[in-house]
Image (cartoon, rainbow, N blue to C red):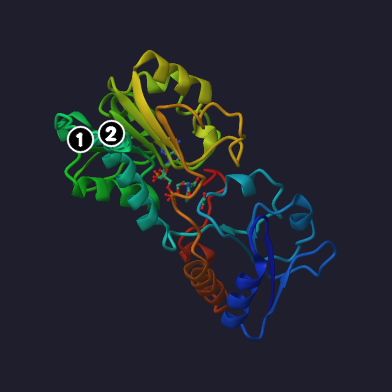
């Protein structure tokens, strides 16, 4: 068996070591131009030339949850794409989003500013009922985040393509449910995959439907958000702030207005990192299952090219 590793911006050696330990009899190599085609590919944002050379692949394993970059490429026909299915990401995402929601709700940013000035001052406690949190995307990450928020007694709304039932979460679905979902939310969390249907989903007319004093947390992809519309709604006071982990251009360019905006908190695409050991264990388990004759449909995380996630 031959496994080709082709991951942009990723230190290859520890992945090769882990994959070789999982498959001592396999050839596991970093891809280079003209290398022999592989049986399995482990990828992150590979170049088109890599995919063009892979005629005999049995599976493409993406070392992230989002496959938007991969699906923009011309994939070898009929080869299944498998994304990471949690692999330690959902707990990180729950930590990040709960932190951002609680920091905003409890005004910890204001207390930090006070402390920096040596000021001992109280803010009036706010009512949780006035801060309903809407989570767009109720998949592996969104469901975990919704449940975690509900544990803190926030009113939680969720929105997905298909209808769901999640204890403690008021669920909306489909285009028909979108406006009601927005109107029922004050804090908006984006955990959607980036697809033609979800591109620019957070823009002037949709964000304007959030309850006054709204707050945006984008942990999905930068292209879900129209940057200028966010800035305009912060300026008008309809939105109170935003915590952004993902951007249209990454790294976020030094001159981008988000960096210095007083109501925006920026983090460098770090809300849920790929954890190498968990990911290798998950990918190796799936390759073993396929090699033992399991059907691709029996694996978690198989991407539906028609849905785009
Ligand atoms: P997932 O399990 O595939 O869940 C996607 C959710 O979005 C599903 O609930 C799906 O609805 C819903 N959805 C998709 N298209 C929709 C539409 N048009 N309208 C309404 N709902 C729609 O994905 P995941 O593992 O939770 O990951 C979500 C995204 O998070 C990834 O695609 C990636 O972009 C991002 N991410 C970011 C980081 C980071 O560090 N910032 C880390 C990991 C992932 P159904 O359930 O009905 O299909
Ligand atoms: C990170 O953004 C991922 O999609 O895993």
Left or right relative to 157: residue 198: right
In the depicted structure, whether residue 81 falls above or below residue 30: above
Q: In this rendering, does residue 197 appear at all?
A: no
Q: How crowded is mark 1: few (under 14 residues within 10 Å), some or many (20 or more)?
A: few
Q: Which of the 4 quarters of the picture holds residue 119? A: top left
Q: Which residue lies furthest to the front in this view?
A: 118
Q: In this view, does 68 lie above or below 130?
A: below
Q: Where is residue 224 in the image (x, y as percent from the top left)?
A: 50, 33
Residue 164 at x, y percent in the picture: 29, 44
Q: Callout 1: helix, strand or loop?
A: loop
Q: Which of 29 and 268 is in front in this view?
A: 268
Beta carbon at label 1 within 8 Å of ligand 1: no
Residue extending farthest top: 236
Residues at marks 2 and 1, CA–CA distance in whole angstroms = 7 Å
Tags 2 and 1 in contact by the CB under 8 Å rule?
yes
| 271 to the left or right of 16 | left
Q: Considering the image in quadrants, where does the N terminus appear?
A: bottom right
Crowding at label 2, few (<14), some or many (≥20) Cα neighbours within 10 Å?
A: some
In this rendering, does residue 184 appear at all?
Answer: yes
Residue 21 on image: x %, y %: 58, 82
Instruction: Indicate which disc residue 114 carries.
Output: 2
Secondary structure beneath disc 2?
helix
Q: In this view, does 30 lie to the left or right of 142?
A: right
Identify the residue shown where x is 62% and y is 46%: 69
In the current view of this chain or complex, which residue is farthest to the bottom? 25
Q: Is mark 2 within 8 Å of ligand 1?
A: no
Residue, disc 1: 120
Label 2 vs 1, first from the N-terminus: 2
In the rendered view, would you say 99 is above or below 211?
A: below
Q: Residue at x 67, y 55 (%)?
A: 8
The residue positioned 52% from the left and 21% from the top of the image is: 228
Tell me: residue 102, above or below residue 203.
below
């Amino acid at each position: 068996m031959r496994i080709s590793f082709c991951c942009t911006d990723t230190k290859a050696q520890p992945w090769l070591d882990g994959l070789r330990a999982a498959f001592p009899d396999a050839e596991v190599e970093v891809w280079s131009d003209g290398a022999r085609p592989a049986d399995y590919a482990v990828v992150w944002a590979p170049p088109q030339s890599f995919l063009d050379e892979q005629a005999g692949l049995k599976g493409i394993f993406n070392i992230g949850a989002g496959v938007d970059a991969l699906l923009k490429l011309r994939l070898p026909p009929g080869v299944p794409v498998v994304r990471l299915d949690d692999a330690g990401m959902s707990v990180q995402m729950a930590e990040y989003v709960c932190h951002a929601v609680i920091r905003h709700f409890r005004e910890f940013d204001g207390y930090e500013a006070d402390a920096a000035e040596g000021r001992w001052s109280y803010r009036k406690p706010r009512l949780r009922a006035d801060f309903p949190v809407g989570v767009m995307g109720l998949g592996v990450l969104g469901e975990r985040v919704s449940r975690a928020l509900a544990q803190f007694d926030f009113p939680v709304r969720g929105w997905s393509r298909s209808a769901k039932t999640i204890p403690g979460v008021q669920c909306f679905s489909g285009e028909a449910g979108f406006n009601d979902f927005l109107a029922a939310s004050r804090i908006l969390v984006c955990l959607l995959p980036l697809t033609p249907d979800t591109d620019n989903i957070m823009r002037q007319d949709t964000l304007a439907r959030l309850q006054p004093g709204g707050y945006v947390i984008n942990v999905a992809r930068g292209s879900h958000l129209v940057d200028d519309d966010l800035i305009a709604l912060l300026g008008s006071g309809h939105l109170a702030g935003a915590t952004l982990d993902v951007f249209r251009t990454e790294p976020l360019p030094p001159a981008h207005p988000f960096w210095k905006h007083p109501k925006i908190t920026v983090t460098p695409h770090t809300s849920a990192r790929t954890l190498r050991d968990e990911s290798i264990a998950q990918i190796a388990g799936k390759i073993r299952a396929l090699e033992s004759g399991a059907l691709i449909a029996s694996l978690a995380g198989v991407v539906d090219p028609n849905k785009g996630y």
